[in-house]
Image: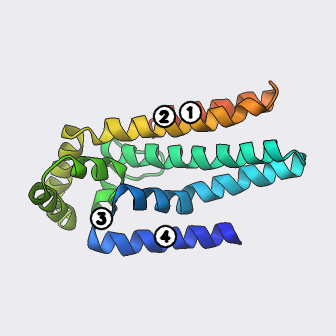
């Protein structure tokens, strides 16, 4: 029940901040930890609990799940700026059209003056026009929002992979390690 509560709180926080286009990196991470990572964290932790009483293993799987969930969401957010069409039918710029401020845009906005950031936020507010979405995407790319976000996703993927080091080599560990690669390397 705590996980569902966290997911709902994350969604509410995102809705609240979306209305104002007022989200910083700290808030972004709180949203994705609650909305996405908490589910993977709980699934991995419960899986470990069902197979072991070893606290070290249970904690390692909790860290693995949370870190993988964060990496997954950041990667997903970058695809909104850099993919032709993703597997779920979500077109490029759909987060922008929904006025969702994600890590690529947060980082790019942090690189410019308040005036320039305000003008970009105005484009997001008027994202129904395709040209505005394109300008926001160009802005994010120009100010390394994608590079920064992908680097951050890789850091969380590394944290997930590091959590697996407590486990002996096995097909299960190999599969979990492969999942980390899949999350980071997926194209849609």
The 10 Å Cα crowd at callout 4, few under 14, some 14 to 19, many 20 or more, is some
Q: Which residue is under mark 3?
A: 99
Q: Which mark is residue 11?
A: 4
The residue shown at (57%, 30%) is 181
- Distance from label 4 to label 2 (Cα)? 24 Å
Q: Which mark is residue 154?
A: 2
Q: Secondary structure at mark 2?
A: helix
Circles 2 and 1: CB atoms closer than 8 Å: yes
* Residue 14 appears in the figure: yes
The residue shown at (17%, 66%) is 126
- Distance from label 4 to label 1 (Cα)? 26 Å
Image quarter of residue 133: bottom left
- Distance from label 4 to label 3 (Cα)? 14 Å
Instruction: Tell me if 16 is positioned left or right of 180 in this view.
Output: left
User: Is tag 3's residue or tag 2's residue first in the polypeptide sequence?
Assistant: 3
Q: Which residue is under mark 1?
A: 158
- Residue 129, image x and y in percent? 16, 61
Q: Secondary structure at mark 3?
A: loop
- Distance from label 2 to label 1 (Cα)? 6 Å
Q: Secondary structure at mark 4?
A: helix
């Amino acid at each position: 029940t705590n996980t569902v509560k966290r997911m709902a709180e994350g969604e509410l926080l995102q809705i609240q901040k979306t209305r104002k286009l007022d989200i910083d990196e700290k808030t972004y991470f709180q949203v994705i930890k609650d909305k996405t990572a908490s589910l993977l964290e709980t699934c991995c932790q419960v899986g470990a609990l069902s197979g072991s009483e070893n606290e070290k293993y249970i904690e390692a799987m909790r860290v693995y799940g949370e870190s993988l969930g964060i990496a997954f969401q950041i990667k997903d957010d970058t695809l909104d700026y850099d993919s032709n069409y993703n597997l779920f039918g979500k077109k490029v710029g759909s987060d922008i059209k929904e006025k969702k401020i994600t890590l690529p845009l947060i980082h790019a906005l942090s690189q410019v003056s308040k005036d320039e950031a305000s003008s970009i936020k105005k484009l997001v507010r008027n994202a129904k026009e395709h040209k505005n979405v394109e300008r926001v995407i160009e802005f994010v790319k120009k100010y390394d929002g994608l590079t920064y976000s992908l680097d951050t996703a890789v850091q969380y993927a590394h944290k997930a992979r590091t959590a697996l080091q407590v486990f002996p080599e096995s097909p299960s560990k190999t599969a979990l390690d492969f999942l980390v690669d899949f999350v980071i390397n997926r194209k849609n």
